[in-house]
């Protein structure tokens, strides 16, 4: 990776871009099933714009990040270190993890918090090839009646929800789109 590539791809106007991305991230987490557009970063492949933007927005030198599978490249490591200072770690210590659903598994390797500190759990950024408001039916906090979201493995997310108030939280990214699934959401298969 060239120095030019390593140093580029971050926010052009960091305070404004980070504020917009943070608002979008918090909105989709508060409203499971909603899909928003996030932009502002140009991360190295194979990270999507949305995944890179989330990492720039939510990570700092105190946040351990697990790069799963194909995302664990020198280019991504250098880009992440330069723009956020976030250290790369294994899955068991990560505050955030990014990769495809297959690369991130199994969920049992991630922190789920403790009874005293349920917030000390991992948030997984799942890179998807498709992200739609269709498929699994979602209910719970932030959802009026029912919402829908295309999920890669409904039973795994149902198992995670059973752990509430413990468990992992999830962002789903595809290109410049992002959706979220907090651990408090109830999931059922449709059709």
Image (cartoon, rainbow, N blue to C red):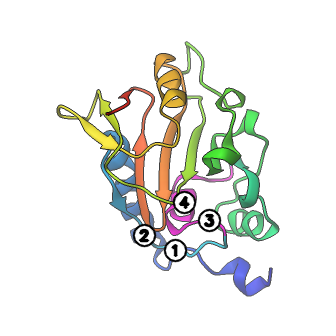
Q: Nearer the viewer, residue 168 or 18?
A: 168
Kindly identify which residue carries mark 1: 11
In the rendered structure, the answer to whether residue 164 lies left or right of residue 187 reads right
In the rendered structure, the answer to whether residue 105 lies left or right of residue 172 reads right
**Dividing the image into 4 quarters, which one contains the C terminus?**
top left
The residue located at (46%, 23%) in the rendering is 161
Q: Gap in Å between the C-alphas at discs 1 and 3?
A: 15 Å
Kindly identify which residue carries mark 2: 17
Residue 63 appears in view: no
Q: Gap in Å between the C-alphas at discs 3 and 2?
A: 18 Å
The residue located at (75%, 33%) in the rendering is 92
Quarter of the image where one finds residue 105: top right
Q: Does the segment drawn in magenta span residue 184?
A: no
Can you say whether 157 is above or below 65 in the image?
above
Q: Nearer the viewer, residue 25 or 191?
A: 191
Q: Earlier in the sequence, mark 1 or mark 3?
A: 1
């Amino acid at each position: 990776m060239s120095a030019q590539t390593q140093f580029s791809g971050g926010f052009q106007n960091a305070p404004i871009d980070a504020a917009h991305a943070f608002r979008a991230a918090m909105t989709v987490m508060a409203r499971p099933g909603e899909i928003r557009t996030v932009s502002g970063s140009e991360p190295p492949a194979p990270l999507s714009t949305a995944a890179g933007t989330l990492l720039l927005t939510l990570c700092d030198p105190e946040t351990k990040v697990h790069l799963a599978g194909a995302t664990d490249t020198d280019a991504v490591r250098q880009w992440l270190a330069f723009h956020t200072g976030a250290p790369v770690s294994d899955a068991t210590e990560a505050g955030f993890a990014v990769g495809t659903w297959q690369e991130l598994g199994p969920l049992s390797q991630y922190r789920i918090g403790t009874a005293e500190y349920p917030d000390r759990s991992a948030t997984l950024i799942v890179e998807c090839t498709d992200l739609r408001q269709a498929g699994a039916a979602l209910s719970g906090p932030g959802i009026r009646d029912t919402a829908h979201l295309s999920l890669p493995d409904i039973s795994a997310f149902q198992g995670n929800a059973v752990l509430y108030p413990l468990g992992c939280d999830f962002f789903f990214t595809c290109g410049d789109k992002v959706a979220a699934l907090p651990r408090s959401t109830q999931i059922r298969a449709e059709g």
